[in-house]
Image (cartoon, rainbow, N blue to C red):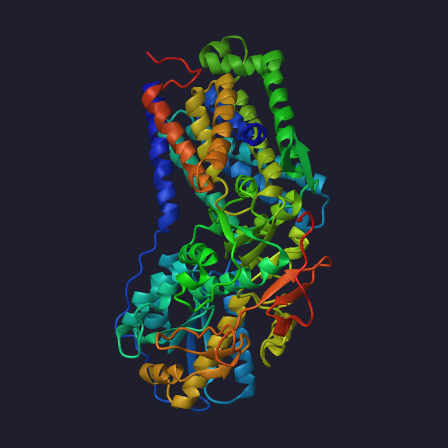
Amino acid sequence: MDVLVQGALTSAVIALVALGFSLVYGVGGIVNLAHGSFFMIGAYSAYAMTQTGAPLLVAAVVGVLAATLAGVLLERLVIAPIRHQEVAVLIATLAVAILVQSGVQFFYGGLERQLPGFVDGAVSVFGVTLQQTRVLAGLIALVTIVVVLLVLTRSPAGRMVRAVAQDEEASRLIGVRPERVTLYVLAIGAGLAGLAGVLTAPYGVLTPTMWLLPLTQAFAIVILGGLGSIPGTVLASVVVGFLDRFVAFNVKDGDIKVGLVTVAVILATLVLRPQGLLGKVAH
Amino acid sequence: MRSKKWAVACTVVAMSALAACGESGGGTAQAPTGGASPGASGAASGETFKIGVFGPEQIPQGEDVRDGAMLAAEELNAAGEGAKVEIVFCDSEAKPEKAIACITKFAQQDAVQAISGGFSSAETLAVLDTVKRAKLPFVSAGAASPDVTKGVDSTGPGKYIFRIGPVNSLSLAADMCVTVTTKLTKEGFSKFGILHEDAAFALPLVEFLNKCLVDPSGSTKGKIPAAVKGVEVVGTEKHTPQATDFSAQFKSLSDKGADFVIEVNSTQVGIQLGKQWATLKPGFALGGINVSGQSSSYFDVTKAVGQLNGPAGIVRAPVSEKTIPFFDAFEAKYQRDPLYNGASTYDGIYALHEAATRAGSLEADALVTELEKTDRIGAQGVEKFNESHDVIYSPTDPKAGLSLLYFQYQTDGSKKIVYPESLAEGNTYMKPPGVK
């Protein structure tokens, strides 16, 4: 039961990060290695606000907005000019990620920081005692994912996103501007990652290298789910989230080995099913 | 499509390279040669004794190394006796390669006459060869690994290496073993779990503890008498220094029936561990080495009522005649309680200065000779070195070496010493909320 409950919560939070990563790849063909930085920017911005005495809710909103703004700036200033040069985008976004890490290190040092939680206590879920803040994070993540999926599948905006993802040139013929859609998607993806950063900060720690784990998890999920496949991303998030908790709870010194899960998932998928769970076979 | 696939493959490679980059830090330290005590010609008043101090400045443990050294230098210079002390601080960033670079810089650029500080066994062990080549006296003040002073004697290449605190991790383990078998069993605990950081100092400690708890006399060749029978180690769990979720380890130890879990961690990970224990109330008591748990702000974040902390902590108590004055001076200057290595670095600077004064010289070999004769009362207690230049641990006689203490967080967040009884001032161990 521990694995089920904790796996569900973990899956929801990592899906929040992976969804943005997958959307940006699906729509713009962009592998954004700075995606984990949005997670960190969200958490640190919220932390910075709490240090000024701002209420936690205000700090959280600012954290999400800061990550969203960072996404817009990244797209406009870095990605847009080189959008069709895939390797250049990879290198540029990696450089941005390192730059953001250095900036955080410069302003805050390496000392681990902590964000207070909206709630502080324990709660029993199906007999499993959990920190309330962890449950809250999982629930908010779950609701957010459902909203994003509904928007993508039921709204005109979602149809535009899917149109661009299916065929960029064809989408132009029906009046869609792919560049604009890419910008919006990157901003939303950044906001989702920022929200994940804000939600997990109260039970995690803020460090200048905190961007790397969510990025590698998102990467593993997107490869497992199938590049650019949104249903695949959600399904893969569940697989990785449960696998993570299964290892933690059932393998001796599982905490030490949990980091290997993402690497193993990437390797196994590339070798056994390169198109991922729900991706299309390339011809 | 092919180019996209290629891009993805590139990404994997780039990320692997990045991860490797993060580990190595890109630092390549050159070993210093011939840096022994330039300008060492005496330690009279008016001369300057340059001491290199290193530690990870970004974390509280490193801040305390720096601030403990600065406080000692300030006091010594204000007193005006002997050489003027100048501290040259180098940020080791908790990375062994950076720590090595610090030693190289001390020897080649800063021309220091001695070195102190260091936090974590990983970075301290990494600098030892460089220290030997630099031939500079090094008073280690933050690492507990037994290997720090392994093979050290008065004549070999390791003669420059001393450790003034904490006591080595095997002694820490022995102290915990004694406390468990003679004190905690009287509180009704019999099934112990161990939850430790995957760190250099912790591994030998846990190995020793596992043997000693079940057979104190056998594992210590009679040095620790067989105490209460029936002590059982029900499980040992490991976590990374970056862990943020301990629920799996809590469940494992709880399912195995642990009624007391001994923690061993030296980094900030202790904060989340304490917080989750206090929040989730897994049914067992918690206590042991938690360096973060020594800080002033720990209780405000964790609300860990009943958590035991020790050995090797420092509390405002009359451990020695210098403990409370040190504690008050540190608190007044930095507005926070010192951690263990704030005290040990502070004492290390004093020990070096006293050695220089006795030697009448800042020359390395003269300092080593005098350091070996150290017999002083410091903030930690009585400080003497054994033949391996390790600070002497004395569990029963506080005049013969360092004794270790254990404090417990009270409901109001205050820290009360509960062991040893001689310092407890009548305080006794209380079972934490939720523990039967």
- Residue B12 in the image: above or below residue A120: above
Quadrant in the rendering for residue B360: bottom left
Task: Say left or right for A224 vs A283.
Answer: right
Quadrant in the rendering for residue A258: top left
Q: Which of B273 and B325 is in front in this view?
A: B273
Residue A238 visible in the displayed image: yes
- Residue B70 in the image: above or below residue B197: below
Relative image position of residue B283 (x, y in whole percent): 63, 45
Task: Say left or right for B92 vs A122.
Answer: left
Give me the residue at 66% from left, 61% from top.
B429
Residue B101 visible in the displayed image: no
Give me the residue at 53% from left, 17% from top.
A177
Relative image position of residue B95 (x, y in whole percent): 40, 56
Image quadrant occupied by the N terminus of chain B: top left
Task: Say left or right for A267 vs B344.
Answer: left
- Residue A279 in the image: above or below residue B100: above
Give me the residue at 35% from left, 38% from top.
B16
